[in-house]
């Protein structure tokens, strides 16, 4: 676990250095508020771990990892505005702190900084651009064409959450100069992890305590949002079993890549287990 913290610390340090160079100072303050207020850093850690498992260039992976975390945070700023959420990671959200206009500018600023990190690699740019298309389609579906069946919900989860997880893993493989099959296999692994993560998130929103999560709960029901719990009649146990199915599929995709056992691969396996067991 200590080595995992070491990886996260490297990501955190690079995040801080990227934001430190942002101008003007007012925008820098807003980006710092959004990005450096905490967070699990799951997606960027996946990027680094995938690259390490392939014995790739970790320095390049760190750049891509920071980029995907910035994209993720940009999407959270917009999510909080749409959801009218006052709290994120135990701190006031960007729009409650700076206002709607400044929050949207902060989201744009995060995307700009992210794409600067991807710009030197065509495959990285294509991967993230596709993920953002999927994310945008997912957000629009959630707002305007809400799923009413479990199948429709699963497609929403794939776009809304799975897409960025997929991009994170594919970026790690790209940093390692992996072939197309390997990039796709790691993408499948992470997409399934992301969907499982979203399914568990829906359960936690319905059952957990707000202080425990560091953000408001019962939001899905209050806003008539199409979560797994709201769309289906599944019990908590049944919903968690659905998430477990996705986790198992993620592990099969990971095992389809012929790479030696390593600490990085072990952590990737642990992540697929963790997302369905987490309490935060």
Image (tube, rainbow, N blue to C red):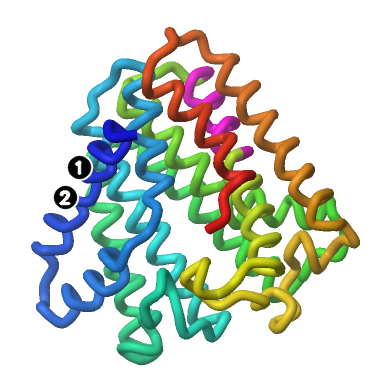
Q: Is residue 127 above or below residue 96?
A: above
Q: Residue at x 69, y 74 (%)?
A: 220
Q: Is residue 137 above or below residue 9?
A: below
Q: Is residue 141 left or right of residue 229?
A: left
Q: Is residue 185 left or right of residue 59?
A: right
Q: Secondary structure at mark 1?
A: helix
Q: Is residue 259 above or below residue 69?
A: above
Q: Nearer the viewer, residue 240 or 146?
A: 240
Q: Residue 43 in magenta?
A: no
Disc ID at residue 10: 1
Position in image of residue 59 (x %, y %) = 19, 32
- Tell me whether circle 2 and circle 1 mark residues in contact (CB < 8 Å): yes
Disc ID at residue 13: 2
Position in image of residue 201 (x %, y %) = 62, 58
Q: Residue 184 in magenta?
A: yes
Q: Is residue 25 left or right of residue 77?
A: left
Position in image of residue 122 (x %, y %) = 33, 36
Residue range highlighted in magenta: 181-192
Q: Residue at x 60, y 57 (%)?
A: 160
Asked which quadrant contains residue 106, the reply is bottom left
Q: Residues within 10 Å of mark 2 (few under 14, many from 20)?
A: few
């Amino acid at each position: 676990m200590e080595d995992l913290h070491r990886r996260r610390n490297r990501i955190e340090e690079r995040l801080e250095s990227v934001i430190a160079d942002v101008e003007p100072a007012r925008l820098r303050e807003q980006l710092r508020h959004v990005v450096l207020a905490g967070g699990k850093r799951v997606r960027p850690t996946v990027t680094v771990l995938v690259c390490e498992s392939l014995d790739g260039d970790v320095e390049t992976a760190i750049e891509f990892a920071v980029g995907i975390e910035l994209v993720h945070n940009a999407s959270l700023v917009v999510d909080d505005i749409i959801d009218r959420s006052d709290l994120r990671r135990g701190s006031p959200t960007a729009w409650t702190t700076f206002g709607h206009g400044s929050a949207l500018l902060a989201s744009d600023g995060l995307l700009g900084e992210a794409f600067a990190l991807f710009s030197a690699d065509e495959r990285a740019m294509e991967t993230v651009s596709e993920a953002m298309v999927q994310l945008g389609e997912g957000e629009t579906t959630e707002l305007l064409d809400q799923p009413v069946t479990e199948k429709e919900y699963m497609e929403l989860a794939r776009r809304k959450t799975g897409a960025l997880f997929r991009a994170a893993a594919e970026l790690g493989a790209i940093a390692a100069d992996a072939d197309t099959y390997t990039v796709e296999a790691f993408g499948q692994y992470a997409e399934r992890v992301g969907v499982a993560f979203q399914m568990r998130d829906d359960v936690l929103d319905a059952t957990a305590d707000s202080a425990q999560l560091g953000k408001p709960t019962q939001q899905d029901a209050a806003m008539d949002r199409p979560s797994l719990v709201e769309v289906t009649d599944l019990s908590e146990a049944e919903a968690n079993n659905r998430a477990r199915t996705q986790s198992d599929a993620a592990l099969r995709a990971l095992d389809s890549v012929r790479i030696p056992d390593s600490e990085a691969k072990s952590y990737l396996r642990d992540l697929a287990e963790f997302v369905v067991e987490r309490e935060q």
